[in-house]
């Protein structure tokens, strides 16, 4: 908190103490409103969820007496919950590496100069700024079995009409969802990795090339370590987004067929707002918050993000 | 020499210029990369093209088999219907919610960021707590907030969603502005203080103007987040303050009857974002990487 003190140095002692007191007030007044709102919308719900999760509020009854760990015990017996976690995990585990590799390949392609490069980059970013719900809606139109262009193109490749039910058939819903995810978010990876690659010291890479090192050797020994800090943050941001994915799936399949593509976010929504299992939803919400908070705080500290 | 160009049939370079490593035949290499770049761009933009084009098609063209790849003539009937039925007001709702929450979040967030940067208020732990709020799963937040709003009578009101969007934007604003404020030299602030300004005056008259580019870039991203939101609006609106994202899903029918409306409404909601982002190319990387890349 140094500046104010040194600045007041040439004034009298009274001025200094008054300046210090004013600064002390100022720094709390300046951060106060923001903290208040964050506590109201961040911490209050957390506590409220915790309280509710120890009661037994359902659509039928408003039993607010202390119910112990009933709802938490329920978590372990709820097959649908674990399936939804598994679905979330599958989507994350498939989409995230693909986005990374594709984004990296694209960044490598656009790293060197070529005429019109800025235009390409500007255009390629567009999918990432579209609302995910609109992206999902767009792909729903794309995937339509009769009037959508995807089946038409697949038909050309296959040489015969292909009325594939992308958003309904159990074998195709995951590819459809992951395709849409990759389409929307590879540009995000691409943009960040392009910036990271551009910051890699060219002279070091060129020196290694002159020494006869091959492309992959240079990539793994020099480039990857250099871009890793940025890559890690991009992976963290995307990984967390995927862990709470809702919009795209809501637009494409609404969790169907049946509950086949229900992610943890969608299952929580259905429980809380369609079935009104208030207390049990509270327990799930608390579980999700706890897991993700631990992961995030660990990752932020690990990466030294907070400097 | 270990010159990789040697064996590849690379034709002459002027002897004075040392041959660059990794040389390919320049025109072939550039041509291939160009072809790849074009192909990738077409693949990524085609869905956007398809969305836009559907919004201009007649119903006969939309439900033509095989699909019509470009409409014969552009017609705006699909948009006219949205305005006639009053559905387009949802875009206005999105605008009000996103603008107001962005303005509040920018002012409060920048104040908080200034406090963090200049006074190290709360130390590193507070900064970590603030950014971890950003990572909270929206579904887990919106559920208790919904119960709170039912109690307050705030469901389906502007103020309810504005408060929620503000709270959700604040960690991002604080985080980004912290980075931008650190780049501002303290000397100007010091001389303003010596001249008798209070800290608040310094904040308004020195810090805000000097950070205006960062403020602008951060505000645009904050706006886009709120503008693109779906889940909060889905849970917390009924009839009065429906946003365009929720309205789009209202057209999803049993057998996709309202394609024209889905497309037209989506385009109405997407065009403003494209324009704002196009003005922002310089700040894009820093904005979406949450400051990890200074760009």
Image (cartoon, coloured by chain):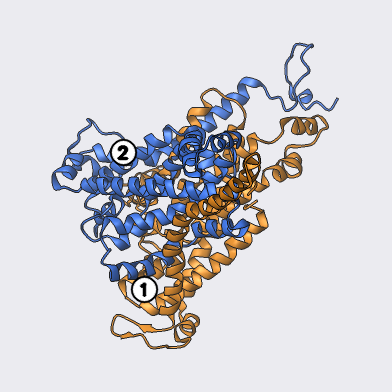
Chain colours: A orange, B blue
Are the residues flagged by discs 2 and 1 from a single subunit? no
Q: Secondary structure at mark 1?
A: helix
Q: Secondary structure at mark 2?
A: helix
Task: Provide the chain ID for the residue under circle 1.
Answer: A
* Figure label count: 2
For mark 2, does the 10 Å Cα neighbourhood hold few (<14), some (14 to 19), or many (20 or more) residues? some
Task: Provide the chain ID for the residue under circle 2.
Answer: B
Identify the residue at horizontal 65%, vertical 39% (top origin): A10
Q: Which residue is mark 1?
A: A271
Question: In the displayed structure, does residue A306 sit left or right of residue A252?
Answer: right
Q: Which residue is mark 2?
A: B52
- Where residue B92 appears, as percent x and y from the top left, is 25, 45
For mark 1, does the 10 Å Cα neighbourhood hold few (<14), some (14 to 19), or many (20 or more) residues? some
- Where residue A41 appears, as percent x and y from the top left, is 42, 63
The residue lying toward the viewer, choosing from A276 and A132, is A276
The residue lying toward the viewer, choosing from B96 and A25, is A25
- Where residue A103 appears, as percent x and y from the top left, is 56, 43
Q: Is residue B76 above or below residue B246?
A: above
Question: In the displayed structure, does residue B62 sit left or right of residue A185?
Answer: left
The residue lying toward the viewer, choosing from A18 and B147, is A18
Q: Is residue A119 above or below residue A279?
A: above
Q: Is residue B232 above or below residue A122?
A: below
- Where residue B70 appears, as percent x and y from the top left, is 29, 34
- Of circles 2 and 1, the one toward us is 1
> As drawn, which residue projects farthest toward the right?
B1
Give the CA distance from mark 2 to mark 1.
36 Å
């Amino acid at each position: 908190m140094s500046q104010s003190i040194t600045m007041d140095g040439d004034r009298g002692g009274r001025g200094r103490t008054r300046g210090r007191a004013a600064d002390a007030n100022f720094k709390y007044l300046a951060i106060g409103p923001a903290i208040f709102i964050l506590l109201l919308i961040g911490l209050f719900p957390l506590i409220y969820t915790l309280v509710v999760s120890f009661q037994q509020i359902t659509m039928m009854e408003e039993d607010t007496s202390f119910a112990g760990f009933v709802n938490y015990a329920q978590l372990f017996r709820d097959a649908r919950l674990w399936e939804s976690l598994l679905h979330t995990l599958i989507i994350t585990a498939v989409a995230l590496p693909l986005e990374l590799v594709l984004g990296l390949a694209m960044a490598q392609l656009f790293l060197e100069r070529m005429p019109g490069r800025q235009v390409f980059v500007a255009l390629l970013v567009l999918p990432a700024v579209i609302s995910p719900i609109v992206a999902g809606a767009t792909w729903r139109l794309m995937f339509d079995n009769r009037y959508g262009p995807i089946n038409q193109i697949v038909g050309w490749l296959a040489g015969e009409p292909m009325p594939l039910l992308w958003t309904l058939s159990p074998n195709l819903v995951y590819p459809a969802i992951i395709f849409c995810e990759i389409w929307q978010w590879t540009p995000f990876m691409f943009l960040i990795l392009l910036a990271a690659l551009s910051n890699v010291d060219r002279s070091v890479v060129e020196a290694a090339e002159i020494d006869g090192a091959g492309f992959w050797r240079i990539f793994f020994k020099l480039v990857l370590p250099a871009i890793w800090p940025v890559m890690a943050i991009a992976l963290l941001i995307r990984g967390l987004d995927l862990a709470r994915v809702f919009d795209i799936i809501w637009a494409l399949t609404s969790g169907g067929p049946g509950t086949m593509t229900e992610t943890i976010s969608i299952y929580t929504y259905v429980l809380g707002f369609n079935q009104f299992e208030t207390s049990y939803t509270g327990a799930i919400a608390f579980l999700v918050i706890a897991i993700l908070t631990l992961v995030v705080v660990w990752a932020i500290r690990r990466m030294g993000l907070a400097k | 020499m270990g010159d990789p160009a040697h064996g590849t049939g690379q034709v002459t370079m002027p002897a004075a210029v040392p041959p660059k490593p990794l040389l390919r035949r320049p025109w072939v290499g550039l041509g291939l990369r160009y072809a790849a770049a074009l192909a990738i761009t077409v693949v990524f933009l085609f869905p956007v093209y398809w969305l836009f084009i559907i919004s201009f098609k007649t119903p006969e063209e939309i439900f033509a088999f095989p699909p019509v790849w470009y409409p014969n003539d552009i017609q705006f009937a699909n948009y006219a219907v949205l305005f006639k039925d009053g559905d387009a007001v949802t875009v206005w709702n999105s605008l009000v919610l996103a603008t107001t929450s962005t303005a509040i979040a920018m002012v409060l967030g920048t104040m908080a960021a200034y406090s963090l940067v200049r006074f190290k208020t709360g130390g590193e732990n507070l900064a970590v707590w603030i950014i971890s709020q950003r990572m909270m799963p929206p579904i887990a937040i919106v559920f208790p907030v919904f119960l709170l709003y039912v109690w307050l009578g705030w469901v389906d009101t502007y103020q309810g969603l504005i408060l929620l969007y503000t709270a959700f934007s604040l960690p991002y604003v604080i985080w980004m502005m912290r980075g931008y404020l650190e780049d501002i030299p303290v000397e100007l602030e010091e001389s303003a203080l010596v001249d008798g300004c209070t800290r608040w005056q310094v904040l308004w008259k020195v810090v805000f103007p000097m950070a205006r580019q960062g403020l602008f870039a951060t505000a645009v991203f904050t706006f886009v987040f709120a503008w693109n939101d779906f889940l909060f609006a889905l849970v917390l609106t009924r009839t009065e303050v429906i946003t365009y994202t929720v309205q789009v899903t209202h057209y999803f029918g049993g057998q996709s009857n309202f394609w024209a409306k889905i497309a037209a409404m989506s385009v109405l909601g997407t065009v403003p974002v494209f324009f704002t982002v196009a003005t922002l190319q310089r700040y894009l990387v820093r904005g979406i990487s949450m400051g990890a890349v200074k760009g």
